[in-house]
Image: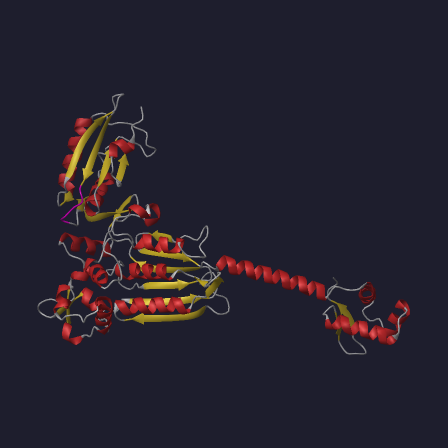
Amino acid sequence: MDLNLSELLGETTEYDKKRDVEIRKPKSWLKSISAFANGTGGTLIFGIADDDTVTGIEDIKSASEFVSQKIKERIDPFPEVTMQIHSTEDGKNLLTVEVMKGQETPYYYRGDGSTEAFVRIGNESVTANAAELKRLVLRGKNSSFDSLMTDYDFKDYSFSKLRERYKEWNGTSMPEKGFESFGIVDEKGKLTNAGALLADNCPIRYSRLFCTHWNGLDKSGGKVDALDSAEYSGSLIMLLNEGVGFVKRNMKMLWKKTANSRIEMPDFCERSVFESLVNGLIHRDYLVNGSEVHIDIFDDRLVIYSPGGMPDGTKIQERDIDTVPSTRRNPVLADIFGRLGYMERQGSGLNKIREAYENAANYGEGMEPVFYSDRVMFMVTLKNLNYKMLINEAENEAESEAKSEAENIALTELERRLCGLLKENSKITQSEIQKQLSLSRSKVQRIMKKLVDKGVIENIGSHRSGNWKVKKII
């Protein structure tokens, strides 16, 4: 019989399958042990092929002892694991190794002359890069980037944007002791990274926001690459305000009349833009040097990019948005923005982005926000809610203009006969046209002037020695 994987794994969302316990290549599965311990935990299951066929393990006792031994020998520090043997009705044995989320990260694989820490990216276990390794070290110390102390003195920096927002949201001035309780400064007067990021003259160089309104559907642009662009630096609060302001001035606002009022129909839902930018600034990976948050506006969409993928290594496009738990990469910043009314601590930002779009007056099928993440970035794509309507209007207008133009240059039978003579003999004289069409000279001149004005014919060269060209006949 086929074993039901969902029954075996229960509610486990992270797992890896192995057909056999590879005795000669234990790294092939030990890297998953390291990655699970460095992530949110997971289960390694032996005896099931990639296509979910239950193959079983023949000598299950020896296999389980070997797995246990290699984990102790080659994973450092030793993670918390639970091993179980499962038997199917047809006598096949399976071995599961449940790995708990580690508290002493990073968990290294040591063997084959190398020392590596692994992390989960989607359904793969990959070697941790420099930024991921730094993050694991911080987690092992129960710390985060935004909580680390800096050498910057609080007295050397101003926080006018923070104070303004605090007063606006709370109705009272921010007390000086609030800076310490917020995690902005320590008792010695030194700023945390969170404090540095919130200072008006933020000293963290790569905390910047790049905004570009591109001309067209991609960055190729044509004759004019960008219609508008700006680069902002300073307090995260200023970056948020300037970013939202950039989007507002670069989007159109349409209106729909109702019986008693009118309904605003902006290109992009402002609430969704705000939530997306907050997400990008607060949850970005500040350990990734040389990379900033970007806002790119195209004719049909707006894209907000921020450095760093999902904190747990999963891919957001493979997740159900409704069940994504709140994981805060920068808990101090998230806390401060929660106290300032910019975000909720429950982590409902992605749902708000989606729901705000769905409630827009000009929302339609295929316009839902798109979330994408990989190892190095998180990206939100918001569709231009008016794009399809504007395209349809432009096509209708072009069709109407073409019809009008066709009507304007529609020729009479006499005009067609004259054009036929010009096509047969481009050097024909007006006297010859008079004879063949039995018309007066003035009548021929009036018809030819009308055809020239309509753009149907034109004279090439001099008046006497030139020739006539028939450009189009409708």
Q: Which residue extends farthest left?
A: 187
Q: Which residue extends farthest bottom?
A: 463
Figure quadrant of residue 63: top left
Name the magenta segment's main secondary structure: loop
Task: Classify 412 as above or below 12.
Answer: below
Figure quadrant of residue 42: top left
Does the magenta segment cover residue 436? Answer: no
Q: Is residue 19 visible?
A: no
Between 346 and 73, the residue placed more toward the observer is 346
Position of residue 193 measured from the top left corner of the image (x, y, whole percent): 19, 65
Figure quadrant of residue 362: bottom left
Position of residue 445 measured from the top left corner of the image (x, y, whole percent): 82, 75
Q: Which residue extends farthest top?
A: 90
What segment is highlighted magenta in the picture? 100-104
Decide if residue 270 is on the left or right side of residue 386.
left
Between 457 and 59, the residue placed more toward the observer is 457
Task: Classify 302 as above or below 441.
Answer: above
Q: Can residue 405 be seen in this view?
A: yes
| The N terminus sits in image quarter | top left
Position of residue 325 measured from the top left corner of the image (x, y, whole percent): 25, 48
Position of residue 394 measured from the top left corner of the image (x, y, whole percent): 56, 62
Counting the numbered discs, the total is 0
Between 174 and 470, the residue placed more toward the observer is 174
